[in-house]
Amino acid sequence: MGDPYRWGASGPSSWDCSGLTMGAWQAGGVSLPHYSVAQYFAGTPISASQLQPGDLVFWSSSSSPQGIHHVALYLGDGMIVHAPRTGRPVTVESMYAWIPPTHFVRL
Protein backbone atom coordinates (compact mmCIF):
# COMPACT_ATOMS: atom_id res chain seq x y z
CA MET A 1 0.00 0.00 0.00
CA GLY A 2 1.20 3.45 -0.87
CA ASP A 3 3.94 2.29 -3.26
CA PRO A 4 4.18 4.50 -6.35
CA TYR A 5 2.84 3.62 -9.78
CA ARG A 6 5.46 3.14 -12.49
CA TRP A 7 4.57 1.78 -15.92
CA GLY A 8 6.18 -1.63 -16.46
CA ALA A 9 7.09 -2.09 -12.78
CA SER A 10 6.43 -5.29 -10.87
CA GLY A 11 7.69 -4.46 -7.38
CA PRO A 12 8.91 -4.56 -4.78
CA SER A 13 8.82 -0.76 -4.37
CA SER A 14 6.80 0.37 -7.41
CA TRP A 15 4.09 -1.22 -9.53
CA ASP A 16 1.91 -0.93 -12.57
CA CYS A 17 -1.57 -2.45 -12.54
CA SER A 18 -0.71 -5.84 -14.04
CA GLY A 19 2.58 -6.01 -12.14
CA LEU A 20 0.67 -5.64 -8.87
CA THR A 21 -1.82 -8.41 -9.68
CA MET A 22 1.00 -10.60 -10.99
CA GLY A 23 2.97 -10.04 -7.77
CA ALA A 24 -0.02 -10.73 -5.54
CA TRP A 25 -0.80 -14.03 -7.24
CA GLN A 26 2.90 -14.95 -7.43
CA ALA A 27 3.03 -14.63 -3.63
CA GLY A 28 0.33 -17.30 -3.59
CA GLY A 29 2.27 -19.57 -5.93
CA VAL A 30 0.37 -18.74 -9.13
CA SER A 31 2.25 -17.49 -12.19
CA LEU A 32 0.58 -14.78 -14.28
CA PRO A 33 1.85 -12.83 -17.29
CA HIS A 34 2.70 -9.14 -16.86
CA TYR A 35 0.04 -7.83 -19.24
CA SER A 36 -3.58 -7.16 -18.33
CA VAL A 37 -5.13 -8.68 -21.48
CA ALA A 38 -3.06 -11.85 -21.03
CA GLN A 39 -4.14 -12.02 -17.37
CA TYR A 40 -7.76 -11.94 -18.51
CA PHE A 41 -7.18 -14.90 -20.82
CA ALA A 42 -5.35 -16.79 -18.02
CA GLY A 43 -8.58 -17.01 -16.02
CA THR A 44 -12.18 -18.10 -16.34
CA PRO A 45 -14.67 -15.31 -17.08
CA ILE A 46 -17.28 -14.72 -14.36
CA SER A 47 -19.99 -12.13 -13.73
CA ALA A 48 -19.71 -9.28 -11.25
CA SER A 49 -22.24 -11.05 -9.02
CA GLN A 50 -19.86 -14.03 -8.73
CA LEU A 51 -16.85 -12.01 -7.54
CA GLN A 52 -14.88 -13.40 -4.61
CA PRO A 53 -11.72 -12.05 -2.96
CA GLY A 54 -8.72 -12.71 -5.19
CA ASP A 55 -10.62 -12.49 -8.48
CA LEU A 56 -9.36 -10.08 -11.12
CA VAL A 57 -11.39 -7.05 -12.19
CA PHE A 58 -10.77 -5.39 -15.57
CA TRP A 59 -11.63 -2.19 -17.41
CA SER A 60 -11.89 -2.20 -21.20
CA SER A 61 -12.34 0.56 -23.75
CA SER A 62 -14.85 -1.71 -25.51
CA SER A 63 -16.96 -4.78 -24.86
CA SER A 64 -14.04 -6.90 -26.07
CA PRO A 65 -11.34 -8.24 -23.76
CA GLN A 66 -8.85 -7.02 -26.38
CA GLY A 67 -9.64 -3.47 -25.23
CA ILE A 68 -8.64 -4.14 -21.61
CA HIS A 69 -6.41 -1.37 -20.27
CA HIS A 70 -6.52 -1.83 -16.47
CA VAL A 71 -6.67 -4.67 -13.93
CA ALA A 72 -7.19 -4.80 -10.16
CA LEU A 73 -7.46 -7.43 -7.43
CA TYR A 74 -10.90 -7.85 -5.87
CA LEU A 75 -10.93 -7.70 -2.06
CA GLY A 76 -14.64 -8.16 -1.35
CA ASP A 77 -17.61 -5.87 -0.67
CA GLY A 78 -17.03 -3.99 -3.94
CA MET A 79 -13.48 -3.01 -2.99
CA ILE A 80 -10.28 -3.47 -5.01
CA VAL A 81 -6.58 -2.91 -4.56
CA HIS A 82 -4.81 -1.52 -7.61
CA ALA A 83 -2.01 0.62 -8.99
CA PRO A 84 -4.16 3.29 -10.64
CA ARG A 85 -1.85 5.53 -12.69
CA THR A 86 1.15 7.84 -12.57
CA GLY A 87 0.80 10.18 -9.61
CA ARG A 88 -1.44 7.84 -7.62
CA PRO A 89 0.03 5.18 -5.32
CA VAL A 90 -1.22 1.64 -4.82
CA THR A 91 -4.55 2.05 -3.07
CA VAL A 92 -7.74 0.36 -1.91
CA GLU A 93 -11.00 1.85 -3.17
CA SER A 94 -14.40 0.99 -4.58
CA MET A 95 -14.25 -0.76 -7.94
CA TYR A 96 -16.81 1.85 -9.05
CA ALA A 97 -14.71 4.86 -7.97
CA TRP A 98 -13.63 5.47 -11.55
CA ILE A 99 -15.75 3.94 -14.31
CA PRO A 100 -17.65 0.65 -14.03
CA PRO A 101 -15.47 -2.41 -14.65
CA THR A 102 -16.25 -4.44 -17.74
CA HIS A 103 -14.74 -7.90 -17.25
CA PHE A 104 -14.05 -10.29 -14.36
CA VAL A 105 -12.10 -13.54 -14.09
CA ARG A 106 -11.33 -16.20 -11.53
CA LEU A 107 -7.95 -17.89 -11.60
Image (cartoon, rainbow, N blue to C red):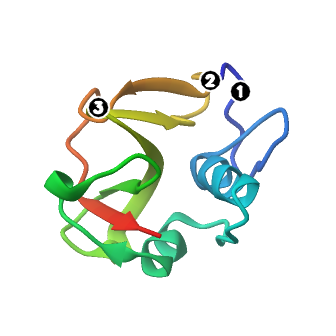
Q: Residue 10 at what x, y percent from top left?
A: 77, 50
Q: Residue 15 at what x, y percent from top left?
A: 71, 41
What whole-number distance in Å separates the C-alpha atoms at marks 3 and 2? 15 Å
Taking the image as shown, residue 24 lies to the left or right of residue 102, namely right
Q: Amino acid at mark 1?
A: Pro
What whole-number distance in Å separates the C-alpha atoms at marks 3 and 1? 19 Å
What whole-number distance in Å separates the C-alpha atoms at marks 2 and 1? 4 Å
The first of marks 3 and 1 along the sequence is 1
State the residue in front, 40 or 84. 40
Q: Quadrant of residue 5?
A: top right
Taking the image as shown, residue 99 lies to the left or right of residue 86, namely left
Q: Secondary structure at mark 2?
A: loop
The mark found on residue 4 in the picture is 1
Q: Residue 32 at what x, y percent from top left?
A: 65, 70
Q: Residues within 10 Å of mark 3 (few under 14, many from 20)?
A: few
Q: Amino acid at mark 2?
A: Pro
As displayed, is residue 72 above or below residue 65? above
State the residue in front, 31 or 15. 31
Q: Quadrant of the N terminus?
A: top right
